[in-house]
Image (spheres, helix red, strand yellow):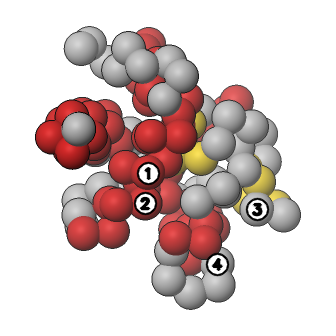
Amino acid sequence: MAADNSNFFEKVYAVVKQIPYGRVTSYGAIAAFLGAKRSARMVGWAMNAAHNHDDIAAHRVVNRVGLLSGKHHFEGTNLMQQLLESEGIEVEDYKIVDFAKYFWDPAKELEF
């Protein structure tokens, strides 16, 4: 099973690497794009494991309503929020303001 998880994680990372600067997507959108619609939590595990990958912008992956649900996996108090704000994304109370404006849907943007 570990090999399956590793392969899935690599597919997740391939999608996350393509999220444009100043845009975000959700765990569920990535899972759906990968044909694993009910695997949003597994995408979250992949993001949690991404700390060893400097080229993965894990801060650009949030929950389905724009909450920074992965914020506790970043060093420092507000690093995830600071990274998003440095890209021009407004965050208030750990939630992206005007989430639809910044949402990037891999199903519409990528081919698999």
Instruction: Determine whether the residue tagged by mark 1 lies in a helix, strand or loop.
Output: helix
Q: Nearest to the eye among marks 2 and 3: give it.
A: 2
Disc 2 vs disc 4: Cβ atoms closer than 8 Å? no
**Residue at mark 1:** 45
Disc 2 vs disc 1: Cβ atoms closer than 8 Å? yes
Q: Residue at x 53, y 40 (%)?
A: 41
Tell me which label, 4 or 1, sits earlier in the chain. Answer: 1
Q: How many angstroms separate mark 2 from mark 1 (CA)?
A: 5 Å
Tell me which label, 2 or 4, sits earlier in the chain. Answer: 2
Q: Is residue 16 above or below residue 87?
A: above
Q: Residue furthest right?
A: 93
What's the amino acid at mark 2? Answer: Asn
Q: How many angstroms separate mark 4 from mark 1 (CA)?
A: 20 Å
Instruction: Determine whether the residue tagged by mark 2 lies in a helix, strand or loop.
Output: helix
Tell me which label, 3 or 1, sits earlier in the chain. Answer: 1
**Residue at mark 3:** 94
Quarter the C terminus occupies? top left
Disc 3 vs disc 1: Cβ atoms closer than 8 Å? no
Tell me where residue 108 appears, x and y as whole percent. 44, 13
Instruction: Determine whether the residue tagged by mark 4 lies in a helix, strand or loop.
Output: loop
Q: Nearest to the eye among marks 4 and 1: give it.
A: 1
What's the amino acid at mark 1? Answer: Trp
**Residue at mark 4:** 78
